[in-house]
Image (tube, rainbow, N blue to C red):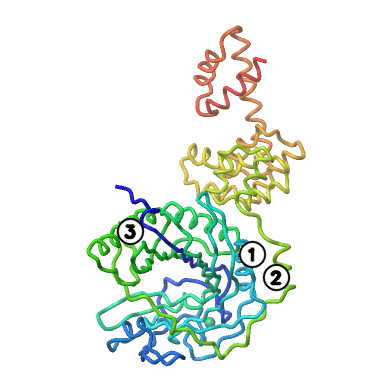
Amino acid sequence: MKNDYKILGFKAGLEIHQQLDTHKLFCECPSVLRTDKPFNTIKRKIHVVAGESGEIDEAVKFQGKGNKDYFYQTYDTTCLVELDEEPPHKINKEALKIATEIALLLNCKIFPVTQIMRKTIVNGSNTSGFQRTVLIAYGGFIQTSEGKVGIDSIYLEEDSARPIEKTEDSTTYRLDRLGIPLVEISTKPDLKSASQVKETALKIGEILRSSKVRRGLGTIRQDLNISIKGSNRVEIKGFQDSKIMEKCIDLEVERQKMFLDKNQKNPSEVRNCLPDGTTEFLRPIPGSARMYPETDLELLHIKKEFIDEIKRNLPKLKNEIEEELRKQGLSEEMIKLIFKGDKLDEYKELYEVNGNPKLISKMLLLLPKEIAKKENKSLEEIEELLNKDVMIFILNAVYNEKIHEKDVKHVLEKICSGVLFKEAIKLGKKDFDEVEEKILKIINEKPNLSPNAYMGLVMKELKGSITGQEAMEIISKLMK
Ligand SMILES: [Zn+2]
């Protein structure tokens, strides 16, 4: 049976961590993940101490137990900052700019002055034992079909080291990920159903991708805080994508209901989402005793001119771009393909060369697939041959009336079979003219047949050199 979220008093808040596409946050090392052999491995231990308030955090106590060894793998793309043997450098301005841009897109207010903080981390994933994090914005919102969702806070912070291997008494981390800039976006606990959680995650994801963020597996992480009336808050981590979210939420609500049915409060804890949507215990929820100021760095001023400059250049959101493409005359299907194939930047560049949206989208999205199929090659191979320079060359040829739009496919085919550009233009045009001539001859030899009858005759004679759709287009043109 589906859960009735309203009756259960369901409340949830989403926390999204997204890596930014720049060098690291507090040093100049590049944000690259390495798969080759490390240059060096060093060993450290971690000791539990009290926070500034004098208390030891619950999560700290839990994970500081035992006498574990921590190994850190270093590379030529990591430096002494990642090893915590050198103070942090000044905060990465580009990362601050991107985070501010994201905050503005989420309708947040920006703090003019703010303090970079240290957040105690005791699982060894930071060589220093803390993560640097800075609150830059608050009080935003996004709209969903189930109502407005408040954005509580936006932090800019450094990513942790990457766990590589765990044994009973040691963990090995790779320092390549440590220090990559992350934005952390937290919504208010405004989410009232599993479907609203999913919609919010997708919307924020879309906004993030309109900014300069890293793409691909592991570059975005989503955590969820869930409670129902009478139960404690549980944090769930490790959603690889939004698909599993709804199922996981339903199962967690069932789990919390089970505790309430037995008149027990469920423990406030952090749980990990497994691929099937069930969860497992990870650790207790960390308290507030784990933040203290980063004394190695000055107060961070986010100046009005800096914010105004970002405001003037805010990127367009996906629905605005879709609307623009629609106005240019592209079909819904083409618009979908542009986003799916990640071809928007290329499309825009080609549009500057020759403002023919239909031809450009056909060249980018349909013809490479057709040619790959016909030539029995992979799409990647064909797309490499038909790179942006080739596309620009062809579009210019159409613009200067050296070839007609209908010749484009044949010219591209010639280029893929290794013919030089200029030669391809001549040949492609000639081939197509010849095809048209042959079809005209067929029509003239047997006048007054139906288009379908001609189609049969044409395909029989020209099999292989033309597709059915192309044949039909030429036949109807010639029969007019
Ligand atoms: Zn570094």
Dot 1 falls on a residue whose secondary structure is: helix
Residue that extends furthest to the left in the rendered view of this protein = 262
Q: Secondary structure at mark 2?
A: helix
Q: Residues within 10 Å of mark 1 (few under 14, many from 20)?
A: some
How far separated are the C-alphas under marks 1 and 3?
A: 33 Å
Amino acid, disc 2: Ile
Question: Residue 452: percent from the left, percent from the top?
Answer: 53, 15
Residue depicted at x 62% and y 46%: 322
Q: Residue at x 55, y 26 (%)?
A: 469
Residue 269 drawn at (x, y percent): 33, 72
Vertical relation: 52 (above or below) 333: below
Depth check, front residue: 267 or 332:
267
In the rendered view, does 98 fall on the left or right side of 216? right
Mark 1 or mark 3: which is in front?
3
The extreme right residue here reads 400
The residue indicated by pointer 1 is: 104
- The crowding category of the residue bearing disc 3, from other C-alpha atoms within 10 Å (few below 14, some 14 to 19, many at least 20), is some
Q: Position of residue 130 (x, y in %)?
A: 45, 84
Marks 2,1: beta carbons within 8 A: yes
The three-letter amino acid code for the residue at tag 1 is Leu
Name the residue: 56% across, 59% down.
209
The disc, 2 or 3, on the residue closer to the chain's N-terminal end is 3
Label 2 or label 1, whichever comes before in sequence order: 1
Distance from disc 2 to disc 1, alpha carbons, whole Å, reads 9 Å
Q: Which residue is mark 3?
A: 253
- Which residue carries the number 2 mark? 307
Dot 3 lies on which element?
A: helix
Q: Earlier in the sequence, mark 1 or mark 3?
A: 1
Foreground: 172 or 102?
A: 102
